[in-house]
Amino acid sequence: MKKILVTGGLGFIGSHVVVELQNSGFEVVIIDDLSNSKIDVLEQITKISNIKPDFYQIDLRDKKAVRSFFNDSTIDGVIHFAAFKAVGESVQKPLDYYENNINALVYLLQEMKNRNIDHFIFSSSCTVYGQADELPITEDAPVKIAESPYGNTKQIGEEIIKDSCKAYNMNAIALRYFNPIGAHKSVKIGELPLSIPQNLIPFITQTAAGIREELAVFGDDYPTPDGTAIRDYIHVVDLAKAHVKALQRLLDKQNKENFEFFNVGTGKGSSVMEIIHSFENVTQQSLNYKIAERRKGDITAAYADTTKANEVLGWKPEETLEEALLSAWKWQQKQS
Ligand code: UFG
């Protein structure tokens, strides 16, 4: 049985990936510092899969702790999620973001290199494309100058991995996520924003639940059919399955290059207004919202060309937008 380290494995995406790895027969060990997650998630994962993953509470900036973890464990591959992820906060605290997101990555890669651990999956983002010149966005679209320190940590992260793969003959895949949403069908794991949500879907579900008074729609004057911005919202379980495919590709030595990257989205763009209406339809909730100013740094539209992920990874999303929105709502109802 292959043993996979999942850093940030108690977070939103990480926890769903842990479950999918266990479903696919992998043994999982989680490192998480609980800075943006709760230990209770470990129990919930265990309830879903009937297997308790090993867990280590480690801050990956603690180089000695990282070394001692690897000294004590035999790991076949690493999926790396642990990172700060709030775009706005990263503008206020750039050094925190560089210190955390970059150091953690470097320390992990160093330990992997020293032990010839070869398989690395990196949690990247469509933010690397900025406002792409052409839609849908293919992996050939140029990487644009980052809009935020957070986005920059993803770009620099990819560069660090590329250089490491070249120098040390490691193999890695970066998955560039579009907008992950939704929750596991068991309603045991989902997105847990510990403060006011910055992302659209948790803000919508909290508004419907009465926790927030009103959703602000950031801008209705974009050059899109209804004037609101367009994104590619993907069910987190589909996204999680893409990680298992990517890992298997590396383990089976099917990768064509040392470092590959794939877009992970649905290929379908939805505007903020379309999301609001779909949410209202599937949940039969009416949502309090108003039109507000554009949010600084937001782009007009982003959705993925998923041909490469479909054909090369053999991965396709299975869940619909409506299923994803409904699962997010069920998850929210369980919280309140
Ligand atoms: N939006 C609102 N009101 C809100 C929140 C969001 O109208 O209260 C709008 C945004 O303006 C945007 C859309 O909903 O048009 C989606 O916003 P999110 O914050 O949910 O997602 P983003 O596309 O802005 O951010 C995502 C990831 C980031 C990543 C970024 C790259 O969450 O990690 O894509 O563009 F950096």
Image (cartoon, grey):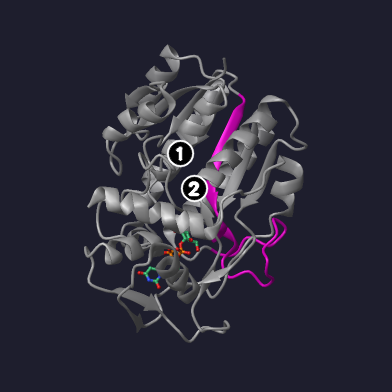
In the drawing, what numbered circle is on residue 261? none
Q: Name the residue under label 2.
A: 236
Q: Who is closer to the viewer here, 60 or 190?
A: 190
Side (left or right) of 334 relative to 167? left
Q: Which of marks 2 and 1 is nearer the N terminus?
A: 1
Side (left or right) of 227 relative to 92? right
Q: Quadrant of the N terminus?
A: top right
- Element under label 1? helix
Q: Quadrant of residue 301?
A: bottom right
Instruction: Give percent across and percent down for residue 335.
Output: 25, 49
Amino acid type shown at disc 1: His
- Element under label 2? helix
Residue 146 seen in the figure: yes
Amino acid type shown at disc 2: Val
Q: Who is closer to the viewer here, 270 or 282?
A: 282
Q: How far apart are marks 2 and 1 (CA)?
A: 7 Å
Q: In which quarter of the image is ligand 1?
A: bottom left
Instruction: Give percent across and percent down for residue 299.
Output: 51, 73
Identify the residue at horizontal 42%, vertical 51% (top origin): 327
Circle 2/circle 1 CB separation < 8 Å: yes
Q: How many marks?
A: 2
| Residue 134 lies within the magenta run | yes
Identify the residue at horizontal 23%, vertical 67% (top origin): 212
Residue 170 seen in the figure: no
Badge 1 crowding class, 10 Å Cα cut-off, few under 14, some 14 to 19, many 20 or more, is: many
Q: Mark 1 points at which residue?
A: 16
Question: In the rendered structure, which segment of residues is drawn in magenta?
Answer: 118-145
Side (left or right) of 49 relative to 289? right
Identify the residue at horizontal 32%, vertical 35% (top origin): 41
Q: In this view, does 272 lie above or below 172?
A: below
